[in-house]
Image (cartoon, rainbow, N blue to C red):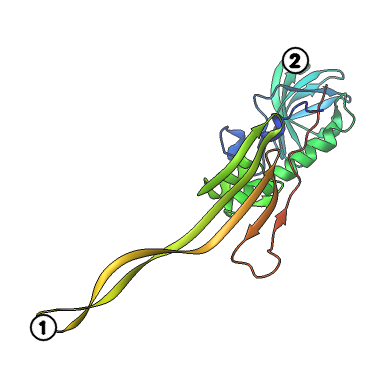
Amino acid sequence: MYLLILLLMVSPVYASNLDKDAEVVSLEGEKIELLVVEPATVFATKKGGRRLGVYPIDTKLQLLGMTDKGYKVKGQATHSLVTGWVSPSKLAAKDPKFIENLKKHYEREMQIRELIANSEVAIGMTAAEVAQAIGEPTKKESKQTKDGMTGTWEYSKGRERKMYTNTVDPSTGQVYRKFSHIVYEETEKLTIEFEDDVVSSIASMENAGVPNVKVIVPPVIFGYY
């Protein structure tokens, strides 16, 4: 049931050359194999361009990255080992829903990148993604289970106010203000609940009534074997 969970927890942090392209989701290092079901022309770029060769039917390809319209793969073409871009329509996996779920993963990854760029959180994000988006919480209550982290993270913002008292100078009788102490006032509070490492609810102290909470698809879990 949980095959390839690591694949779909790929961090949005730009760690590879493929990820430097805003339209590309890198899958390098995941060792995903796809099978060529129709002769597949290999192109130099994600938008086509120069033809690098053709992958014959039944060729096994390593998936390196993807956009919403093409896959970057590596495999043995008719003349040599070639790395380039091919159409998903020419490929297949043993799991008939693999390609469909891979597309869902791509769409989710694009949403995650936008949320992180805007320092926003949404139901369906993982704990690691939340930390990338808005940092570590000011208060954390959590426990680790075999399925992931469960618990609550709290983020608070506030301001310090200096407090003063009126004091009478015994020698002159004049009244003056004297610093007393500092009070911290909480102005914002964000509470995020997790279940099995995925955000299940978000509450904000700023909002009156129902908060405007975004929801995305949780990490898609699938296998290609």
Identity of the residue furthest to the bottom in this view: 173
Amino acid residing under circle 2: His
* Residue at left offset 61%, top offset 40%: 142
| Rendered view: 43 above or below 169 | above
Residue 73, percent from left and from top: 72, 26
Residue 99, percent from left and from top: 83, 34
Residue to which mark 2 is pinned: 79
| Rendered view: 84 above or below 130 | above
Q: Secondary structure at mark 1?
A: loop
Amino acid residing under circle 1: Thr
- The quadrant of the image that shows the N terminus is top right
Residue 37, percent from left and from top: 89, 24
- Between label 2 and label 1, give the one nearer the viewer: 1
Q: Nearer the viewer, residue 184 or 96?
A: 184
Residue 118 relative to residue 80: left or right: left
Q: Secondary structure at mark 2?
A: loop
| Rendered view: 157 above or below 93 | below
For the question of whether residue 163 can be seen, the reply is: yes
Label 1 crowd (10 A; few <14 / some 14-19 / many >=20): few
Residue to which mark 1 is pinned: 172
Residue 56, percent from left and from top: 84, 19
- The quadrant of the image that shows the C terminus is top right
Determine contact: label 2, label 1, CB under 8 Å.
no
* Residue at left offset 72%, top offset 15%: 80
For the question of whether residue 128 can be seen, the reply is: no
Separation of marks 2 and 1 at Cα, in angstroms: 100 Å
Residue 65 relative to residue 156: left or right: right
Quarter-wise, where is residue 178 in the image? bottom left
Q: Nearer the viewer, residue 13 or 5?
A: 5
Quarter-wise, where is residue 42 in the image? top right
Q: Which one is earlier in the sequence, the residue at label 2 or at label 1?
A: 2
* Residue at left offset 21%, top offset 79%: 176
